[in-house]
Amino acid sequence: GPRTGWWRDAVIYQVYVRSFADSDGDGIGDLPGVTARLPHVKELGADAVWLTPFYASPQADGGYDVADYRTVDPLFGSLSDADDLVREAHRLGLRVIVDVVPNHTSDQHPWFRAALAGGPERERYHFRPGRGAGGQLPPNDWESVFGGPAWTRTADGDWYLHLFAPEQPDLNWDHPAVHAEFESVLRFWLDLGVDGFRIDVAHGMVKAAGLPDIGASEQAKLIGSQVLPFFDQDGVHEIHRAWRALLDSYPGERIAVAEAWAPSSERLALYVRPDELHQAFNFQFLTCGWDAERMRATVDASLAATGAVGAPTTWVLSNHDVVRHVTRYGGGEQGLRRARAATLFTLALPGSAYLYQGEELGLPEVTDLPDELRQDPAFLRAAGQDGFRDGCRVPIPWTAQGPSFGFGDSAPWLPQPAAWRGLAVASQSGDPHSTLELYRAALALRRELPGLGDGTMSWLPAPEGVLAFARPGFVCTLNTLDREVQLPLPGRPLLTSAAVEFGADSALLPAESAAWWAI
Ligand code: TEU
């Protein structure tokens, strides 16, 4: 039934394919590389992998510019490699979620090429005449997420809309051919055996009728406010409902997770109503900082909003678009301390959790990449809103040796810091104090303890700066302060992010640490 789905408390591990494992020595990760490293994900204790786009693409935006939704880019392998990956994952008991990018295609997609040549495919995108004398000005005042106008002029004088890079023209979801094509693409991958989809820019597919100017309101112009005529329009929900019906027509509970940036928890919850998508990323921990009261409010708002529609929430600390959370939390030893604590805290909450490759190693953001190696179109346009995104996409270190710490047999597409030798999977494996072993232990306990996963939680009284909550048979404590705090003993210690001292009836929580207790 709908309340017993595997996805309600799933731990889903995000693989950024380009940076996970390189099987053919070209310095770029690929699907056979992922397949060979699936045992790491299994041993970690995740339930599923989500693979970022590996489809045919000119790679203007790390593959989020798709030229053919039904083929694998030769950079990443072949369709038969995708098939092997899905089979091997299933053999290991892991589910596989793939990305679908329906807001825009690549400018090299056959539709857009035909559109530029003046064909009827033009109607499948948003082409408009310009404003001002000779149509010299863009049709409206919308700005691209990557900076600059959201419009580019073509040789024949018309302009086309792109909310992201000019190489990513936005599709017109008022056109029936667009609906039919994407339903066919979903079926293609479902037939190949995938267990679900991560829907890129799920909140952006439908634009306000007439593509109105944002207007004079400076506040509305801030991309971060998300109160914009091209995001979170009510019309997107009809598409998601149709996709849900399609998913439900397949056996085995195939799921969809929305990448949606909504202006409030309540608006986000609309995406996960019972006849819509299964999950939506809850991005609130990306911005809530390290503050007990804000963290508590974030948890409350997240659980209340999705709970009201019967959906589980999701917990996200990092992904391929944001600064890694070790660095967001201050970097260095302090950042790592907080990151480990935040992980135990979120993994103990009700709902599903998304992990981003490398966070289980405590990898920090790489901030000193040479400009000429950067690939992020936001960097290339020099106008990123939240910083640039190559520093969280540096290839994973697997071993202490080799030209790329085991990522592949040659130099990786982005250089790894020398200190990553000590953060490699092989370096941390078996070290009980390592971040990798903390994640493994946490995920193993999450499976074993009946009180974790989906369900309810309740806050317990705690001193200022400390959060404590109970779940059946279980308590989690988080000390956000930079000094130790003494508490009445919450229970029998199960797992801690930093060594806790405890006696017969009290415990000393170290600075910036979390602990799990059995009661
Ligand atoms: O991201 C959509 C999005 O709006 C966020 O990317 C964010 O605002 C931006 O990354 C900040 O720089 C998705 C993908 O996750 C991202 O990698 C793609 O670049 C984008 O869609 C376009 O497909």
Image (tube, rainbow, N blue to C red):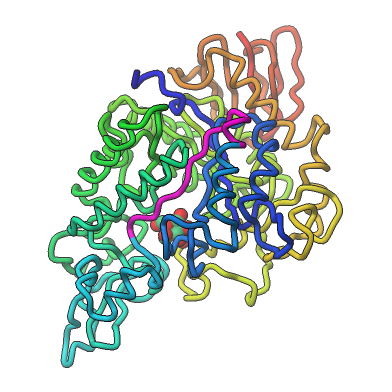
Does residue 347 sit above or below 375 in this rendering? above
Do we see residue 439 in this rendering? no
Residue at far right of view = 401
Q: Quadrant of the C terminus?
A: top right
Name the residue rendered at 38%, 68% in the picture.
Answer: 109
Q: Which x, y percent locates residue 160?
A: 27, 75
Foreground residue, 108 or 238?
Answer: 108
Residue shown at the point (53%, 67%) measured from the top left: 376
Image position, residue 329 (x, y; %):
61, 47
- Asked if 335 appears above or below 450 in the picture, the reply is below
Residue 267 or residue 52, whichever sits in front: 52
Q: Residue at x 54, y 34 (%)?
A: 48
- Image quarter hosting the N terminus: top left
Q: Is residue 90 magenta?
A: yes
Q: Is 107 placed left or right of 320 in the picture?
A: left
Q: Which residues are magenta?
A: 88-103
Residue 284 can be seen in this image: yes
x then y, percent, for residue 197: 42, 43
Asked where in the image residue 337 lies, by quadrant, the reply is top right
